[in-house]
Structure formats: structure tokens, C-alpha cells
Image: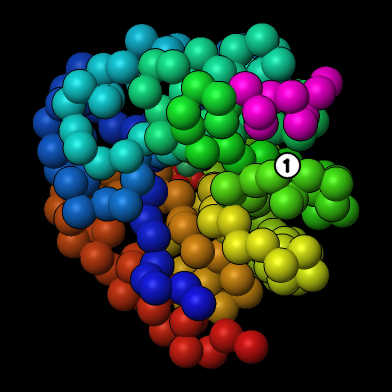
């Protein structure tokens, strides 16, 4: 049973020159979402483990690190060692997914797998028992501020069904184009954590934006099947 809707603002949309202040502004969030892009798996380039360390040094909000990198086999555990509370990597980039999950766990973090919009939920079947989190991308990764892909809702329901079938309850996170406008339907479909970049950092009052998305999402809890 979902206790409450979790919100993870993405610092992709923060002012990196004023990161400490922009982290203070989201102290009511459940996680801070850190988008790591390597310029290979996705066209864009962002942060490395040093930024995860800087985030950890400047907030007590746990860090949810989303790796959009071509080499999670080599690098995922480094982000756990840098202090990430959750490290998630893309199934499309992984050679030995089970080994990566074990390495993240051994380094002391929770482990998640991310699936792109065109990757089927069935790709998680053999590994869902080992995961703390499944992240459904609702945009093609690489940039903030993109439009939500509607078919993602069906995929969220499919992840929930797969988790139930396996008797596990990973966090079900959705990333890309999430806002107060679609929070209720996402939570109703089975999401438990929503990433919000532009929907939080695009607003002057970030705490109010977080509260608004959370409140909108709560309407979906009651409607759940
Ligand atoms: O992983 C991401 C992009 O690849 C970001 O987390 C995501 O796009 C958040 O930004 P927004 O809420 O503005 O869509
Ligand atoms: Fe992300």
C-alpha cells in the first residue's frame, strides 16, 4: 500500500551555479533526482560522481541518481560510493544487469533499472525480484522540459502488474513531463514516485510546486484498482 506520493525534483533544471540554494529550496522533497548524462548514451552531458558528492554535502534529502551512460557496468557502483542513496541505470546500456545491481548493493545503495519509452516492460521480468526501483521513462532521455509520452501510463500499469505477479514492491518512478496535470493518473496507474524538473524548478516557489504535484497525485491513490 502506497503511504504517500513521493516527489523527486530534478536538478537538471536547477541553477547549477547556485546549487546549494536550489537544493535548500526543495527540502520538502522525498529525493533529489540527479541526471547523469555522458554525451554517448544520450546526446547531452551533465554531471559526474563529484556532483553527487556535492549534492550529498549540501542537503539531507536523499539522492536518486539516474545514470544515462553507456558504461553502467564499469561506473554504476562509483555513484553509490559517491554517496547516492539510489542508483538507477538503463537496461538498454547494460551488459550484465544482475552484476551491476549486485555491485550497487555492495556499495551500499538501492538499485534501480530504467526503461526507455520504446523498451518493453517484459525486459524486467528476469530481474525485477532484485530491484528496489523501476524507472519508466516517459520522454526519450537527454533533455528536460519535454512532452510526456501518453503510452507511458500503460507501461506503469504493466510494471505494477509484473511486480505484483512476483510478490515484490519496488518504488515505481516516472521521469519526464510529470506535473500536477498528470500526477493523479500516474499514481492511479501504479507510480509511487514522480520526477519533476521543469514543473518544480520552473516555478518561483519550489516548495509550493512540490506540494501541488503531491496533492494532485494523492487523488490517484483513492482511485487505484
Ligand atoms: O531524465 C531526465 C531527462 O532525460 C529528466 O529527469 C527529466 O526530463 C526531468 O525533466 P522534466 O520534468 O522537465 O521533464
Ligand atoms: Fe532523470
Q: 200 or 221, which is in the foreground?
A: 221
Q: 169 or 15, which is in the foreground?
A: 169
Residue 2 on image: x %, y %: 47, 73
Res 180 → quadrant = bottom left
Task: Identify the residue at image location x=27%, y=25%.
Answer: 55
Res 164 → quadrant = bottom right
Label 1 CB sits under 8 Å from any ligand 1 atom: no
Task: Identify the residue at image location x=67%, y=19%.
Answer: 72
From what the image shows, is residue 141 above or below residue 217?
Answer: above
| In magenta segment, residue 19 | no
Residue 12 on image: x %, y %: 40, 31
Task: Identify the residue at image location x=47%, y=82%.
Answer: 221
> What are the residue bounds of the magenta stretch?
95-103
Task: Identify the residue at image location x=27%, y=52%.
Answer: 29
Left or right: residue 86 compared with residue 215: right
Q: 124 or 168, which is in the foreground?
A: 168
Left or right: residue 21 compared with residue 100: left
Residue 152 on image: x %, y %: 69, 60
| SS majority, magenta | helix
Identify the element where label 1 is drawn: loop
Q: Can you identify the residue that label 1 sits on? A: 116
Amino acid at each position: 500500500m502506497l503511504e504517500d506520493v513521493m516527489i523527486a525534483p530534478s536538478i537538471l533544471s536547477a541553477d547549477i551555479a547556485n546549487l546549494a540554494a536550489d537544493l535548500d529550496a526543495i527540502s520538502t522533497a522525498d529525493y533529489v533526482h540527479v541526471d547523469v548524462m555522458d554525451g554517448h548514451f544520450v546526446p547531452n552531458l551533465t554531471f559526474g560522481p563529484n556532483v553527487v558528492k556535492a549534492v550529498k554535502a549540501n542537503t539531507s534529502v536523499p539522492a536518486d541518481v539516474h545514470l544515462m551512460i553507456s558504461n553502467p557496468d564499469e561506473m554504476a557502483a562509483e555513484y553509490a560510493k559517491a554517496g547516492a542513496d539510489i542508483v538507477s541505470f538503463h537496461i538498454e546500456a547494460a551488459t550484465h544487469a544482475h552484476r551491476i545491481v549486485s555491485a550497487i548493493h555492495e556499495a551500499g545503495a538501492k538499485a534501480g533499472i530504467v526503461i526507455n519509452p520504446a523498451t518493453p516492460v517484459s525486459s524486467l521480468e528476469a530481474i525485477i525480484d532484485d530491484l528496489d526501483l523501476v524507472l519508466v521513462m516517459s520522454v526519450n532521455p537527454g533533455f528536460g522540459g519535454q512532452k510526456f509520452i501518453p503510452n507511458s501510463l500503460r507501461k506503469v500499469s504493466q510494471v505494477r502488474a509484473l511486480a505484483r505477479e512476483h510478490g515484490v514492491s519496488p518504488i515505481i518512478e516516472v521521469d519526464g513531463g510529470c506535473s500536477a496535470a498528470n500526477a493523479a493518473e500516474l499514481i492511479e496507474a501504479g507510480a509511487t514516485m514522480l520526477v519533476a524538473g521543469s514543473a518544480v524548478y520552473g516555478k518561483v516557489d519550489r516548495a509550493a510546486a512540490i506540494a501541488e504535484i503531491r496533492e494532485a497525485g494523492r487523488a490517484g491513490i483513492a482511485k487505484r484498482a
